[in-house]
Image: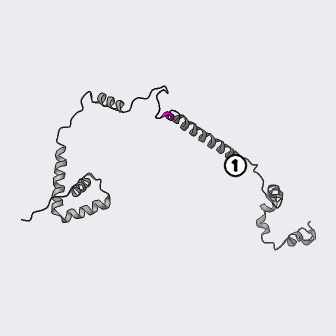
Amino acid sequence: MAKTSPLSEEERAELVAYLDGELPKPAAQALEAKLNTDPRLRAEVDTLRCTWEMLDYLPKPEPSASFTSRTLDRVSAIRPVSRASGVGRAVGTGQRWRPWALGASWAAAVLVAAVVGYRGGHWLSSGTRPSRTTDGVDVQPQLVKDYRVIENRHLYENADDMSFLRALLDPDLFGEEN
């Protein structure tokens, strides 16, 4: 009968991490491949699983009635409660203003966003936008003046040039109307 060597601490830690679901997926897949080929690892995993399952049957200890108060006493001994007065406060002196600064900065950000939103919405909804200029000519008044031409553009698309359109204005071109 061949004697098998015991598992190293690293191998055992890897098996425990695998059973706890703490191994990354590639490492878990590599370990599963090892488990399929190594009966020594498989036996150790089975033993560890049984041990974990047996732990569920052990009675769970209940904390004593004074546990909470003793814990709080120890915590307050480690970190003393800060006083309301500024006397003796060397650490955390600037901590008192932080909530106010955070609240004030949020309020300022909301106010700026509201003003920008209101002004932008007002500018977009109003009919009077700043007119653009092209070569020194205001575009908006020019568009109003040429509105009929723009509106009937589809009728003028077949004309070759402006002289043809001007010739259409001549009343003698089509004869007299009755």
Residue at (17% x, 59% y) in the render: 42
Q: Quadrant of the N terminus?
A: bottom left
Quadrant for residue 68, please give it.
Answer: top left
Tell me which corner region of the image, top left, top right, bottom left or bottom right, holds residue 174.
Answer: bottom right
- Which residue sits at x=14%, y=61%? 5
The image quadrant where one finds the C terminus is bottom right
Percent position of residue 101, x then y:
55, 36
The residue wearing badge 1 is 124
Identify the element where label 1 is drawn.
helix
Which residue is located at x 62 percent, y 43 percent? 113
Where is 76 relative to 173, above or below? above
Residue 129 at x, y percent in the picture = 75, 50
- Please name whichever residue, 123 or 13, is drawn nearer the observer in this view of the structure: 13
In the rendered image, residue 125, in percent from the top left (x then y), is placed at 70, 47
Q: Position of residue 172 (x, y in %)?
A: 93, 71
Identify which residue is drawn at 53% across, 34% down.
Answer: 97
The verdict on residue 43 being magenta is no
Vertical placement of residue 128 versus 66, above or below: below
Q: Is residue 70 left or right of residue 1?
A: right
- Please report the bounds of the magenta region as a residue range: 86-95
Q: Residues within 10 Å of mark 1 (few under 14, many from 20)?
A: few
Locate residue 81 relative to residue 104 in the image: left or right. Answer: left
- Up/down of 175 relative to 140, above or below: below
Q: How is the image coloured?
A: one colour
Up-down relation of residue 116 to residue 4 (above or below):
above
